[in-house]
Image (cartoon, grey):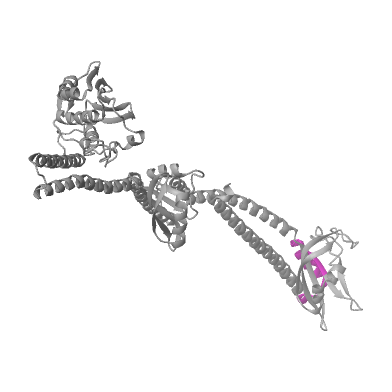
Amino acid sequence: MIWRSVVGKLWATIIGLACVVLVILGVLLLQFLDRYFYEKQSNDLKHLAEQLVALVVESPARQDVIRVARAVVEAHDTRLVVIGLDSGEKPKRVLLDDRPSAASDVPEVPLDALLRHTALQEVLKGKEVVVRGRFPLVGAGGKSGRALFEQEIVAVGEPVPLGSGTYGAFILYRTLEDVETTMTHVRRLLLYAAGICIVLTTFFAFFLSTRITEPLRLMKKAADRMARGAFDSRVPIRTRDEIGDLARTFNRLAQQLDETIHALQREKEQLASILRSMADGVITVDRDGRVVVTNPPAERILRAWQEGDGAALPAPLAALFQRVMRERRELATDLPVQGRIWSVVMAPLYDRDDVRGAVAVLRDMTEERRLDKLRKDFIANVSHELRTPLAMLQGYSEAMVDDIAATPEERKEMARVIYEETRRMGRLVNDLLDLARMEAGSFQFDRQEIDPVAWTDRLLRKFSALAREQGIALKAEAVGEIGPLRVDPDRLEQILTNLLDNAFRYTPPGGTIRVRLRDEGGGVWIEVADTGVGIPEEDLPFIFERFYKADKARTRGQAGTGLGLAIVKSLVEAHGGSITVSSKVGEGTRFTMFFPRTDAGDVAGQAPKTRPSRDTGRGPA
């Protein structure tokens, strides 16, 4: 509403002030005019009365006084009453004569009303009196003395000395009807002038208030735009007064606010970018234990942990949060949740001296803990694998030194055992070096384009004699057309040789080993399947781990390093491929490999740094 606005309030204030001023001026002016007219009338009557008294004093001849008084009264719209003393010293009215005077149209005041007036009684004591008031009047020339109406008159009583200290009186009075008429016209003029003044003041007030409040409205609109986020809003500066100063201050404030908001926005975006790029989960919690801010990893963690209210802190973190809020210090712990191990560091957030919440950083330590365990197992396995050949080397060499072998055949057997164990340790060391180089990304590949079918046939010919010797059927099969493949032939031979060696080792006579090739999915699939003893199902997830041996009862003649399948997996993945295994005990085992035709990881002939899905695995080789 306009009355609630600055324009309405300013307009109402100006109009109210103008009305108050007009009322005060009108009252003062009317009082002044009333007093002025009253004094003028009273002065005229006093002057007239003084003239009549002077006539009486200077010319005691009654006829002369009557003639002069008559002339004077006829010249003025006035009634004259002459009061003397009778023999009983009671006042009485004496008319100049019985003829109508010029003042006959002036209503007459009864003598009793005049004589009852206290002030007029003072005239007979020799005092000049001026009286203004309402008196009962009768019609002009009336004799009844009955009051027909009341009207305000002004009367002047002038004492007339009669001698011996007694006084008569000349009382001249006239009505203030003309004054009232004049005052009525003046009041009407004042009302007209006040109306015109109010109208003009209204236009002026609206003009002034609009001119004053227009910059304020512009500032309000600019503030509204800023509240909606438009911090570049500015107010035009049109004056150099206080409003202009306010506009300049507002613009400076808007500029500083704009710069501050942009700085805060940049910091917020930077913080959000940092939080998004963090691999660790970050959770901010208020003092009530409700999640306030999270980053994407933390959101995934919360979705996996939460069961009820999505904004509440998950149960695994609630106890730690209560401890942090109670002890007001940073705490760290490991939480096993859903089969994984999480390292949680939680610290309180302060608002001056008050703790307003906490921030927690969560890191999935499952892989690190597993790798740490595998590293320990790796060291133990390497120590175990080296301990046996070293013990045998030590034992047989001591026997030879002590000349325990009695015959050349026994010495030759001891030398053969020492030689085989030395070769076994050499293979173990070489396999470890190969794995280390592949994991470090320094393993060199010499990629060449080969015909997979011809290359496989050539490799299988190397195993044909072994197959005949063990009574095992060795077969190669190509499904459809097989296109060329770009790989490192030596490493591919190392892969297949390892798999075929395992197949021959665990396939009994009369069994079958089959190498099958097919071309689909943008690469070549190679399967190596046997009808051997198979691998127990519980061992399949660990088959590619280092030093893992599915057959715990293998003989020394069948023993391997336990690194063969780990190397196979690393070499396949270094070519950008993949390998899987399926097996049933008593039915056989199938290894399936995929080699893509394009390997984005191969740059300038160097294999990318790859890790098996289980870094420290054990294979049955």
Q: Classify residue 340 by image quadrant.
A: top left
Q: Nearer the viewer, residue 264 or 420?
A: 420
- Percent coordinates x, y for residue 143 in the rendering: 90, 61
Judge whether 504 appears above or below 551 on screen. above
Please state which of residues 66 and 488 is positioned toward the viewer in this rendering.
Answer: 488
Quadrant of the frame with the C terminus: top left
* Most distant residue in the front direction: 406
Q: Residue at x 20, y 45 (%)?
A: 388
Q: Is residue 557 above or below residue 130?
A: above
**Can residue 559 be seen in the rendering of this structure?**
yes
Residue 61: x, y in percent?
81, 73
Query: Which residue occupies the extreme bottom position in the image?
Result: 164
Residue 593: x, y in percent?
Answer: 26, 28
Q: Residue at x 72, y 67 (%)?
A: 42
Residue 459 visible at all: no
Q: Is residue 552 left or right of residue 71?
A: left
Image spot of residue 115 (x, y percent): 85, 71
- For the point 73% across and 72% down, which residue is it? 50
- Residue that lies at the very extreme toward the left in this rendered image: 408
Residue visible at 20% across and 40% down?
Answer: 435
Q: Image check: 10 left or right of 303?
A: right
Task: Give the side of residue 358 with respect to residue 552, left or right.
Answer: right
Horizontal placement of 581 versus 76: left or right?
left
The residue segment tinted magenta is 55-81
Q: How many marks?
A: 0
- Examine the structure image and report whether residue 369 is included in the region drawn in magenta: no
275 and 113: which one is in front?
A: 275
340 lies above or below 182: above
Q: Main secondary structure of the magenta part?
A: helix
Q: Is 605 or 531 nearer to us in this picture?
A: 531
